[in-house]
């Protein structure tokens, strides 16, 4: 088992992937509808009702959140790695198109205002991610379209009037959805629900796709351009200094070191009362009265995000950046190429009294004597992790640690649990990696309020979130694999090449027990595939999702500070 996946477990998934990669070899456009048969045959665990006439609202929402709001107007999607690739293909004005974003996926995307979306891809993982998302979106759009047309349309429904209970029941009858499904749609669309449904009812969706370049060299060039941007703007902060590489996000470490949220607690609490955020008001009162075990720090970080997103608080955004810079953090925004921002934190500039109060206070004198920096990136998708860590390792003098935290699906836990693997099967290389994860349950337990910590677990790095089915998961679960994610395998392939004088192997059992640097992986559960439809498309964890995020961030930062000051 550990030497590869039996073909019976993933032959339908492999057929789907072979189909779209063979089609993408075409120099022209391919139509997504050519993939619908193999997509539905795959029986993806994220698209349980793909074959049904009933809409799969969980799959629809999951796909919608990972695509920009302009998708109803999009017919053609272009995939390329860089401006140069788009330019060679005759799209030299992409940089002047409208930048667009997706709520649930970081990717550089630009819309021409008519029918074309340009998406910058960092690796083959972006293809394995985007194509199933586009296919699921088209399938579910057309299901809803057909149901609306069969009902005679929604033209007579008034958009300026809130839905009555009778209207809600009628809408559920038309769309063949449950009350929970309708609530989910209302949560993400708000008062635009009817206008969006009318748009879907007015036309069918037929996406066309074109891959402008897909060679390994093109991906490597894009990664090199990404690094050159960092070197040009902040290379002097890395030159000759030991580096701790962290793959996480761009908010948690910044909040833990700046002290900004705690210093502005009164402003944040006044904000939620002024805006009448009833749930947050009740939660804060319960925290103050010690009626719940929630972390006040996590609550303030969540509120700070909402506070800074309000246009009225533009000055606070600048003040926050200033506080982060005072604490030694330099932020480098990505340009074109990879949509992966970076941060450099100079450990000797940290201000001990501003650190999150849950962290042990480091020795200030030893802190000032440290020459090390933390190089933190907004975690990439799939194979881009291998490219980025390899590029960083080639360009810094010494890596003292490699730490990765990110989302995962769990087969034996609950949403909010933290999973710590010491075995990883990587679908890309077909290697099984065995290693000593530098983290254990005791490193996380002091910081995790709601979930559990599951260490000594076995993880599988998959090629895409849609590229799994029940047969696939059951096979791995029988072999003890409980953690499904996308980055650990590529990172371990890069770590292998940092230890051995050759490229990572294929289809082998690889032992990574002897290294001269520290490394570890922390995954927090955001999906439970065995609970049908229970994914982040259907579940919104609100600020409770901060609990595992900050528990893992605290564990990483504590380890780095302890290693630098002991």
Image (spheres, rainbow, N blue to C red):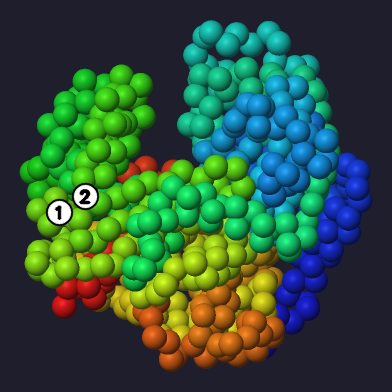
Residue visible at 44% across and 47% down? 233
Residue under numbered circle 2: 327
Task: Name the element at disc 1.
Answer: loop
Neighbor class of circle 1 (other Cα within 10 Å; few <14, some 14-19, many 20+) is some
Q: Is residue 555 left or right of residue 386?
A: left
Total tally of numbered discs in the picture: 2
Left or right placement of residue 124 versus residue 165 in this view: right
In x, y percent, where is residue 368? Answer: 15, 63
Q: Quadrant of the N terminus?
A: bottom right
SS class, disc 2: loop
The alpha-carbon separation of the residues under discs 1 and 2 comes to 6 Å
Left or right, 425 with reference to 330: right
The answer to whether residue 199 is above or below residue 545 is above
Q: Please identify the quarter of the rendering in which residue 461 is found.
A: bottom right
**Left or right of 415 in this view: 284:** left
Q: Position of residue 546 (x, y in %)?
A: 32, 50
Label disc, if present, on residue 464 of the rendered structure: none
| Residue 225 visible in the shown view | yes
The residue closer to the viewer here, 20 or 110, is 110
Q: Is residue 248 visible to us here? A: no
User: Is the Cβ of the residue at disc 1 closer than 8 Å to that at disc 2?
Assistant: yes
Q: Residue at x 56, y 38 (%)?
A: 102
Residue 76, by quadrant, is top right
Residue located 65% across and 89% down the image: 508
**N-term mark: 1 or 2:** 2
Q: Which residue is mark 1?
A: 351
Of 253 and 138, the residue lying toward us: 253
Q: Position of residue 282 (x, y in %)?
A: 20, 35
User: For the point 49% across and 14% down, which residue is it?
Assistant: 162
- Report the quarter where the C terminus lies: bottom left
Q: Residues within 10 Å of mark 2 (few under 14, many from 20)?
A: many
């Amino acid at each position: 088992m550990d030497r590869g996946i039996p073909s019976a477990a993933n032959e339908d998934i492999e057929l789907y992937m072979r189909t779209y990669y063979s089609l993408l070899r075409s120099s022209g456009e391919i139509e997504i509808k050519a993939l619908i048969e193999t997509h539905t045959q795959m029986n993806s665990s994220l698209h349980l009702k793909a074959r049904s006439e009933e809409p799969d609202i969980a799959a629809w929402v999951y796909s919608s959140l990972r695509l920009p709001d302009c998708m109803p107007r999009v017919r053609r999607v272009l995939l390329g790695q860089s401006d140069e690739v788009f330019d060679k293909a005759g799209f030299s004005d992409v940089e002047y198109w409208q930048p667009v974003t997706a709520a649930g996926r970081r990717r550089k995307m630009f819309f021409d205002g008519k029918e074309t979306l340009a998406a910058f891809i960092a690796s083959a993982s972006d293809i394995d991610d985007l194509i199933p998302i586009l296919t699921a979106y088209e399938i579910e759009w057309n299901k809803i379209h057909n149901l609306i047309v069969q009902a005679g349309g929604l033209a007579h429904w008034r958009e300026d009037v809130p839905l009555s209970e009778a209207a809600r029941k009628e809408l559920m009858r038309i769309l063949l959805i449950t009350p929970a499904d309708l609530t989910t749609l209302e949560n993400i669309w708000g008062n635009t629900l009817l206008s969006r449904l009318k748009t879907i009812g007015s036309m069918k969706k037929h996406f066309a796709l074109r891959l402008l370049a897909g060679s390994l060299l093109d991906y490597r060039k894009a990664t090199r351009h990404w690094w050159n941007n960092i070197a040009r703007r902040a290379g002097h902060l890395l030159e000759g200094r030991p580096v701790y590489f962290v793959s996480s996000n761009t908010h948690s470490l910044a909040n833990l070191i700046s002290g900004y949220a705690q210093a502005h607690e009164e402003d944040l609490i006044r904000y939620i009362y002024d805006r009448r955020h009833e749930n947050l008001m009740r939660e804060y009162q319960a925290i103050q009265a010690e009626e719940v075990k929630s972390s006040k720090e996590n609550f303030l970080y969540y509120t700070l995000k909402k506070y800074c997103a309000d246009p009225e608080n533009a000055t606070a955004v600048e003040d926050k950046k200033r506080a982060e810079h005072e604490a030694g953090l330099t932020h480098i925004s990505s340009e074109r190429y990879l949509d992966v921002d970076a941060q450099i934190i100079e450990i000797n500039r940290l201000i001990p009294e501003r650190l999150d109060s849950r962290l042990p206070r480091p020795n200030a004198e030893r802190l000032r004597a440290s020459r090390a920096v933390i190089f933190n990136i907004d975690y990439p998708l799939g194979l881009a992790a291998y490219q980025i860590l390899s590029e960083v390792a080639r360009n810094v003098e010494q890596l003292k640690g490699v730490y990765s935290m990110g989302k995962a699906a769990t087969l034996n836990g609950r949403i909010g649990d933290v999973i710590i693997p010491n075995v990883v099967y990587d679908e890309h290389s077909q290697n099984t990696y065995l290693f000593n994860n530098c983290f254990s349950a005791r490193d996380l337990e002091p910081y995790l309020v709601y979930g559990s910590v599951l260490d000594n677990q076995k993880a599988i790095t998959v090629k895409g979130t849609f590229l799994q089915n029940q047969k696939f998961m059951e096979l791995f679960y029988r072999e003890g694999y409980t953690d499904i994610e996308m980055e650990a395998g590529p990172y371990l392939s890069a770590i292998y090449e940092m230890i051995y004088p050759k490229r990572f192997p294929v289809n082998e059992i690889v032992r990574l027990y002897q290294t001269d640097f520290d490394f570890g992986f922390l995954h927090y559960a955001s999906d439970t595939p065995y609970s049908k439809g229970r994914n982040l498309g259907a579940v919104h964890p609100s600020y409770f999702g901060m609990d595992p995020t900050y528990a893992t961030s605290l564990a990483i930062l504590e380890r780095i500070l302890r290693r630098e000051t002991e």
